[in-house]
Image (spheres, helix red, strand yellow):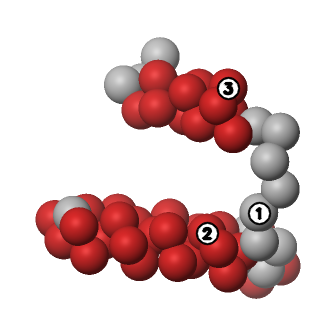
Amino acid sequence: MYFTDRGIEELARRRGEEEVTFEWLAERLREFVDLNPDFEIPVERLATWLARLDDEDDDE
């Protein structure tokens, strides 16, 4: 188990029943980076990965 799994499990446990929009998620990511600028690159990579999940070109 990765260290980050604990945070992911807590997120699922505490907020798993909620529905959110991607706009809401984008705002939370912006807030997080504003408060934690050292995490700008990992957040950017996560956001890009989420944005491109269904891109057929990435499968090749």
Q: Amino acid at mark 2?
A: Leu
Name the image quarter holding residue 3: top left
Q: Residue at x 61, y 69 (%)?
A: 25
**Label annotation for residue 13:** 3
Residues marked 3 and 2 touching at CB (< 8 Å): no
Q: In 3D space, how far apart are the residues under numbered discs 1 and 3 (Cα atoms)? A: 15 Å
Q: Residue furthest left?
A: 38
Q: Is residue 24 visible?
A: yes
Q: Is residue 29 left or right of residue 15?
A: left
Which residue position is annotated with label 2?
25
- In the image, is 32 to the left or to the right of 16? left
The residue type indicated by label 1 comes to: Val
Q: Is residue 60 visible?
A: no
Label 1: which secondary element: loop
Q: Are marks 2 and 1 in contact (CB under 8 Å)?
A: yes
Camera-side residue of 49 and 24: 24
Q: Residue furthest top?
A: 1
Residue shown at 59%/26% (left/top)? 9
User: Residue flagged by tag 3: what amino acid is it?
Assistant: Arg
> Which residue, given by chain and number where applicable, does mark 1 sit on?
20
Crowd rating for badge 3 (residues with CA inside 10 Å; few <14, some 14–19, many 20+): few
Asked if labels 3 and 1 touch by Cβ distance under 8 angstroms, the answer is: no
